[in-house]
Image (cartoon, helix red, strand yellow):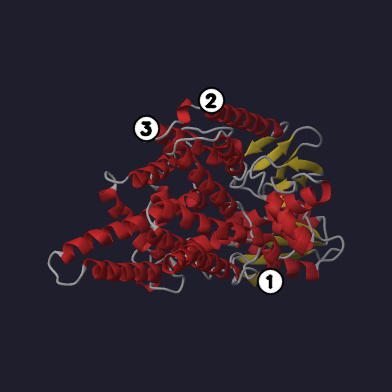
Amino acid sequence: MPANHTYNLFWQVYIPFFIALLTLLLRLQNIDVPSITQDESSMIRYAQEGILERGYSFRWRGGEEFLLSTYELVPYPIAASIFFLGFSEFAVRLPAVFFAVGTSLLIYYFASHLFNRRVGLLSAVLFAILPWAIYWGNNAFYPSQLQFFALLLTILVHRLFFTVQKSNALPYLVCLCFLATFFSWEVSGIVLPVFLVIGIFLHTKKSNWHTKKHTWYAVCIIMVIVVAQLTYRTILRYPYEKMGDSLSDIPFLRLAFTRTDFSPFFYVQAFFKSDAHLMIILFFIVGLFFLRANQSMRFLYMLIIGCQVFLTIFLGLYAIRYGYFLLPYVIIIASAATFLFSDYLAGSLHSTSLVSLNVIRRANFVVLFALNVAIALPWGLQGLRVFSETEKNPPPEFLYHHRGTSFRTIALTLQEHYQSGDIIIVQAPSPLIVYTELTGDYFLQSITSSAVFFNSTDSTYYMDKWVGNPVLRNNHELESILYRNPRVWFVSVPHHRSMKRLEPMLQDLITNKMTLVAESTNGRLYLWENIFF
């Protein structure tokens, strides 16, 4: 009995504590080093200007309240953290860290439940140390929060599908968790039809979810709220007309393969851009050989493939972070395949060896576990560059030591040199507001790459989507501002993206006729001084 107690204590207390601590420390390390990003600053503004000031989520745009119609739940943990800790990079990113720790524990529990504790341990450790997971695990945007609620939802749905329900509460818990997932990022609603398909194809005699009226009551509640949110989101755009693409243009899913920018293998190719994913990819493929004999593997593969199909075919906008919430399922499959293959290999070796089967299994466990961890570690064996292109760096979110774009450096330099009456043209106003409370005066764009709004109600003009600054659209409009003011600042962060929005004539005017005051990682600060004032 004491030995059994010690064994359970090890797996149920010590291992989860180790996983949580490892996840926490790797995300707290250098949490305040990268500058706050444009996306993070948007959520911070909703928290500061809206929740902490008025009690609901909005930000000021063009002198009016602009209500949040996506990521609705994301600013609330940020607001709570700012309320108790004050504003800092540490405070605004701390909720993401807690969500990441929660996700690592859920991975351990879920993988152990589906397979065994060895799989749970490897899955959770890989999630804790993977650079992609570390990046989003201390970023104040939505992916960490979404991933936590999506995984919790998956665990509840799995229980709903594969156990006989004696309680009527579970369908409503699924409903509540789905809404938390949905309001963290509305596109995540794609999991609902995917789960429905899985429930139909993997139906077992043990499951009675489809015969319970409370299941369908919960589904009706979900559908009513989803339709209401999509309607509300559409109404909020009135009376503005938008130019340029963004997720807010999509009231519902669309056929992406009818568009010229359709990329059917975007997410698969993106995952190959980090050498840290080498063993995960290898054993994800190996897992296909165990698909037929293992229902848990079929459940996870169907979930991943179903969500990828929806994201690829019915969304039409692509970003690596859109697929981040699926990472735990990929890791669990790879970890399960690692040990299924290990046991198969041990059986083969035992038939031709005098060594006991348990010894071979333990040796295989140690070797494969160590190899997976060594390659996934941020400072591990990633110098091999098997997948990463030698000419190009991997995406920033795959890099553990990436410092981000230097919004903070440029913003603080501007604040130091700013004089009353100066005009500021800023390409990313939200980080500037967060660091300095300066909102800027204009937004410069001659090539429509960032969505802008046309206000036709009062004085007609285009305004940027972040704070409502008027948009300067060409060389003539920029020169009219320069020659009518004594000092004009141009804040070009991120610099390369900012310059892509401008035609060559505007680029030449800025780089040749304005003075470069400050330069840092992908950031430039220019000043125009009018000699006639």
Q: Image quarter for residue 29?
A: bottom right
Residue neighbourhood size for the residue with mark 1, other residues' Cα within 10 Å, grouped as few (<14), some (14–19), many (≥20): some
Viewer can see residue 272: yes
> Contact, CB < 8 Å: mark 3 with mark 2?
no
| Contact flag, marks 3 and 1 (Cβ < 8 Å) | no
Tag 1: residue type?
Ala
- Location of residue 323 in the rendering, given as x and y in whole percent from the top left corner: 48, 49
Element at label 3: loop
What amino acid is found at the position of numbered circle 3 in the picture? Lys
Instruction: Please give left or right for residue 292 compared with residue 214 in the image.
Output: left
Q: Nearer the viewer, residue 253 or 18?
A: 18
State the separation of the CA atoms marked 3 and 1.
68 Å
State the image quarter where residue 303 is shown.
Answer: top left
Viewer-nearest residue: 172 or 307: 172
Residue at which label 2 appears:
213
Left or right: residue 278 compared with residue 42: left
Instruction: Determine crowd level at label 3: few under 14, some 14-19, many 20+ residues with C-alpha closer than 10 A.
Output: few
Pointer 1 residue = 518
User: Does residue 391 lie above or below 323 as drawn?
Assistant: below
Under mark 2, the amino acid is Lys
Residue furthest front as drawn? 1
**Circle 1 — which element?**
strand
Q: Which callout, 3 or 2, points at the residue further toward the start of the chain?
A: 3
Where residue 61 appears, as percent x and y from the top left, is: 76, 45
Q: Earlier in the sequence, mark 3 or mark 1?
A: 3
**Would you say the residues marked 2 and 1 are in contact, meaning their CB atoms lie under 8 Å apart?**
no
Nearer to me, 19 or 465: 19
Report which residue position mark 3 lands on: 205
Q: Nearer the viewer, residue 192 or 381?
A: 192
Q: Which mark is residue 53?
A: none
How far apart are labels 3 and 2 at the CA level? 18 Å
